[in-house]
């Protein structure tokens, strides 16, 4: 409904589901990653910043850690 009725608007959705990193579902320029820098701040970058071939699975690259914004969250206090 939003897509069919919205004009000059944005919808921002956040998720931890890597299945949504599907280039048939969403364009590369609308998939963004957030990574924490050494100072604890957030850095944002788009999937389109990476020059991946169109036949390469971005989801597999992400899950292997090749795109940053690492998929495995570890509680450092428990280590």
Image (cartoon, rainbow, N blue to C red):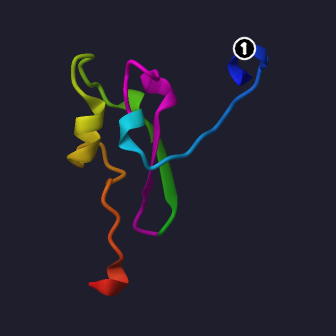
Seen in the image, is 24 located left or right of residue 79? right
The magenta span reads 21-39
Position above or below: 51 against 70: above
Seen in the image, is 71 located left or right of residue 42? left
Residue 41 in percent (x, y) is at 51, 63
- If the image is split into quadrants, where does the C terminus sit? bottom left
Badge 1 density bin: few <14, some 14–19, many ≥20, Cα 10 Å: few
Seen in the image, is 4 located left or right of residue 79? right
Residue 12 in percent (x, y) is at 63, 38
Q: Is residue 36 magenta?
A: yes
Q: Quadrant of residue 23?
A: top left
Residue at 70%, 29% (x, y): give it: 10
Residue at 37%, 51% (x, y): give it: 69
Residue 76 in percent (x, y) is at 33, 79
Q: Quadrant of residue 5?
A: top right
Q: Is residue 29 magenta?
A: yes
Q: Quadrant of residue 28?
A: top left
Residue 33 in percent (x, y) is at 44, 44
Badge 1 is on which residue?
Answer: 4
Residue at 40%, 67% (x, y): give it: 38
- If the image is split into quadrants, where does the N terminus sit? top right
User: Closest to the observer: 31 or 40?
Assistant: 31
């Amino acid at each position: 409904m939003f897509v069919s009725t919205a004009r000059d608007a944005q919808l921002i959705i956040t998720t931890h589901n890597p299945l949504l990193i599907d280039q048939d579902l969403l364009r590369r320029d609308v998939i963004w990653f957030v990574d924490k820098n050494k100072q604890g701040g957030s850095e944002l970058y788009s999937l389109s910043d990476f020059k991946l071939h169109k036949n390469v699975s971005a989801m597999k690259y992400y899950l292997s850690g090749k795109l940053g914004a690492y998929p495995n969250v570890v509680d450092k206090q428990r280590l």
